[in-house]
Amino acid sequence: MRKHWGLLGIFVVVCIVTALYGTNFLTAYNLMNLVQRTALFSILALGVGFVIGTGGIDLSLGSVVCLVGIAVPWLLIEHGWSPWVVVPVVLVGSALIGLGHGLLITRLRLQPFLVTLCGLLLYRGIARWMTGDQSQGFQGEFAELRSIAVGRIPVPGLETFRLPATTIPLIALAVIAAIFLTRTVWGRWLLATGSNEAAARYSGIPTGRLVTGAYVACSLLAGLGGMLFIFDVGSAQPSDFGNFYELYAIAAAVLGGCSLRGGSVSVIGIVLGTATLQVLRNSINLLGLGSQLEFAVIGAVLLAGVAADELVRRWHAARLERRGAG
Amino acid sequence: MRSQPTVRTILRTRGIGRRFAGVTALDGIEAEIRAGEVLAIVGENGAGKSTLLKILSGVLPPSSGSLEEVDDDGRTHELRLRSVAEAAQAGIALVHQELNLAENLDLAGAILLGREHHRFGWLDTRSMRAEAAQWLARVGLDLDPSTLCGSLPIAQRQLVEVAKALSTNARILILDEPTSSLSARETERLLAMLDELRRSGVAIVYVSHHLDEVLSVADRVIVLRDGRMAGTLDRASMVRATIERLMVGRTLPPTTARPSLDDAPTRLIAEGVVSAHRRRRPASLTVKRGEIVGLAGLVGAGRTELLEAIAGLGHAGGRITLDGRALTGSIAERVARGLAIVPEDRARHGLFTLDPVRTNVSMAWLPRGAHAGLVDRAGERDLVDGMITRLRLRPADPARRVQTLSGGNQQKTILGRWLSIEPSVLLLDEPTRGVDVGARHDIHEAIRAAATAGCAVLFASSDLEEVLLLADRVLVMHDGAIAGEFLRDAATEVAIMGLATGGAMEAAR
C-alpha cells in the first residue's frame, strides 16, 4: 500500500477539485456511474496486469471486448440461441483467443506487441464482418440476464446510492488475483518469470505455461468485461465498441505501479489506477473542459505519474547505492 | 627479457576515505600509482576495493582526502574527478568486472562507442574497423571487427573490454577482476599483454582474487581489509601466505576430509550425450552417490553445453539416467526429479536482481513447501533464515535486494536456492567465479556437505586450483568431447592442461 500513496493523493485531489468546482459530482447518480465504470474497466485492467507482470503486453483486449460484446446480442437476438449456451461459448471463445496469443508468443517466440496488435485488427474486423457492421442490441429483452451488470444493490443507511452489481465480480476477481499473485506458488513464479525469464527457466519454473496462462487470463477477463459492458449499455456499434479500452487498461495498470518491464503487479494499484482515470474522465466532463481534451489530460497525467515514479525509484536506488557497496 | 621502464609516480591518493550513510567503507588510503608499474589491490569482498576503484575512476567522489596528479616536472596538483568522462580526460580508464558491451553492436562500434569516426555526419565504418582491428590485435584477439559482441563467448568479451579501455589512450588502466571469466591460457595471454603495456609506460591498477596472478604480474600489492590499508608489499616481500593473512585477518579452517566412495552406487549416468556444442561429439560420464566430479577444460571445450544438456536446457541427444530411471523432458520436469543447476552467468541466468534474498532463495523450494498451491510463508521464512546461517550469507538480511550483495553472497544465494530442495544431482558451472577467498571456502564446504548427504555433484571450472581442491575425480574436456579422466590423487595441473589442450591421455601420464 505504501507505494500507492502518490496515486491515492492524485485520486483524492481530483475528487475534491471536481466536487468543489464541478456540478453534480457528488450526486448519487454520478457516483453510481463512476463505480460502475471503475468496476468494468478494472476487470479489463486486472487481466492485462497479469500479462504485464510477465513482461508482455496485450493490445487486443479492446477488440476482444468488441467481438464478445457484439457476439452476445447477435447470438441471442439474431440467432435465437439460449443464454445458457451463449455465455459459456463466448467465455470459452475468449479463453481460446488468449491461448492462441500465448502459444504464438511462447512456442513460436513472436513478440507480444506484434501478436496482439494483429489480434486488435483481426477481432474487430471479424466483429464488423459477421454483423455486417450493424448495431447489435438486446431490444429490451433479457432484462434478467442484463441485471448482472445493470443491477443495483441497496446499501443500508443510504437512500439514493445503490451499489452497482458489477462490484461483486470485481471484488471477487481482485481478491482471487491478489491471493494468486502474492500467496500461490504459480503467482510467485509468474512474477519471477517477468523479472528474469532466463533465471526463472534455469530455476525449473515452467515459464512457457505461465506466460500462456497469463494471456488466457487476460483474454478471458476481456471477454467477461465485454459481456458486462454490453449488458450495461444495451446496444453497440461494431465499429467503435471497445475502442481504446486496451489503452485505458494498460494506462491504469501502469499508473497503479505495474512495470512494463515485468515482475511487479499490484492489484490494489490497478483498481486505484482505474478509479483515478475514470474520475479524471468524469471531471473533465463536469468541469466543462470539453470532452475533446479527454485523451490529452489522460496522457498528461499518465506521463507525469510514470515520470514521478521513475524519479522516486532512482532516488531509492541512489540511496541504496550510497548505503551499500564497498 | 624484461627491459626496465622508467618508473615514475603519476597519481597519489592522500588519505582517501568514503562514508556511506554514516558507515565507513574506506578510510585513510595512501597509494601511489606509478607509470610503468603494475599495482595490485587485493582484499576480500567488502574490503573497499570497489569503492577505491570507483573513486579512482571518477564514479564516486571521496568524502575525505584527495587525489594528486604529478606532472612531468614533478609538481603536484590536486585532481578532482566529477565524472567518468573527466577521469577519461585525465587518462584514467576502468575495465569493468561486469561485462557491459552492447550486444547488438559490432566490435568496432563497441570499442569506439561514443568516439565514432564520422565524415559529414555519416559513420565512417571502414576507418572505425581499421582502428578497432589495431586495438583487438593489441589484446591478442584475432577477430573480424564486424563481428557482433553478442556472439562472442564471455572470455573474449572481457578482452574486448580491455581493448576498449586501451583505445582511449589511457595512461592509467584500472582492471577489476579481469580474469574471472578467462581460462588459464587466456589469463596467461592477458598477463603477458599487461607486461607489455607496463613496459610501454602505462600505469596499471590490477584487482584480482587470484593471488597466483597477482604474484606473477604485480610490482607492488596493497592489501585492504575492512576499508583500511592492511599493508603494502613490494616485490621482495610478496609472499602468498603473508597476503592471505593480511586479507582475511583470520586463518581459514581446514577443509573437510572426503569419505571413500569405492562402494557408492552410481546415481547419474549420461550416455552419448550430444550437446549444443558446435562439434556435436557425444560425451558419456557417470557420477556416484556422494561423489564430486570436476569438469576441466578450456573455455569453449563444451563444459557449459554438457551441463546444460544434462539439465534439459537446449537441444540434446543421448541417454541420461538418474537413480536408474531415464531423466527426460524440460528442465522444469528434471528439477522436479531433484536436479539442480547453478549457471555460469549468475546475473543473467541465476538472479532476480531486484528481488530480495528471501524470494531468490525460496524460488525452487516453493512447490515442495506448498499446501494446495499456497506458499507456506512461515516455512519459507525458516528455510531462508536457516540457509543464510548455513552458508554464512552477509549481510544476514533476507529482505536485502540481491543486487546490492557482493559476488560471493550472490553466488551463495543461488546455491542456497538449490540446497533448499536437497537435490539428487547438483550441477555447477564456475561455482566461485568472482568470489573472494572466504566465500569460496564457504561455497566449497557447502558443496562437500551436499555430496556427503548423498548428492551427485558435477561441476565445471576454468580454475584448475579449484578443480584440484574440490573434485574427487576430474574429467577433462577438449573440443566438445571428454578427453580423459583422473582420480584425485593422479590429477595435476600439468596433466590436466595437457589433455585440455589436445594432448593424448598417455602423454599426460
Image (spheres, rainbow, N blue to C red):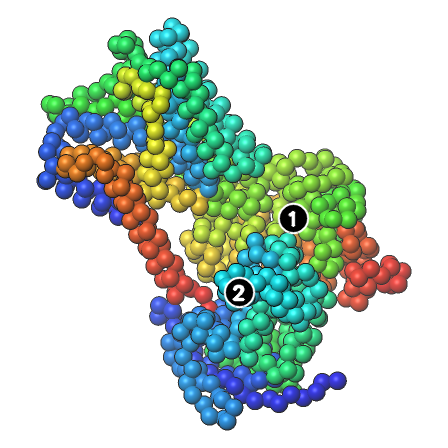
The residue at 66%/63% (across/down) is B182
Between disc 1 and disc 2, whose residue precedes?
2
Q: Residue B426, labelled with which disc?
A: 1
Quick check: can you spot residue B61?
yes
At mark 1, the secondary structure is: strand
Q: Around disc 2, counting alpha carbons within 10 Å, would you say few (fewer than 14), some (14 to 19), or many (20 or more)?
A: few
Residue on which disc 2 sits? B119
Residue that sits furthest to the right in the current view: B506
Dividing the picture into quadrants, the one containing residue A51 is top left
Q: Quadrant of the C terminus of chain B?
A: bottom right
Residue B436 percent location from the top left of the image:
57, 66
Front residue of this view, candidates A306 and B169: B169
The residue at 53%/71% (across/down) is B94
Q: How many marks?
A: 2
In the image, residue B227 sits, relative to residue A180, either above or below, namely: below
- Which chain is mark 2 on? B
Residue B345 percent location from the top left of the image:
59, 54
Dividing the picture into quadrants, the one containing residue A297 is top left
The residue at 24%/18% (across/down) is A151
Evaluate whether label 1 is on the same chain as label 2: yes
In the image, residue A321 sits, relative to residue A43, either above or below, namely: below
Q: CA–CA distance between discs 1 and 2?
A: 55 Å
Front residue of this view, candidates B391 and B76: B76
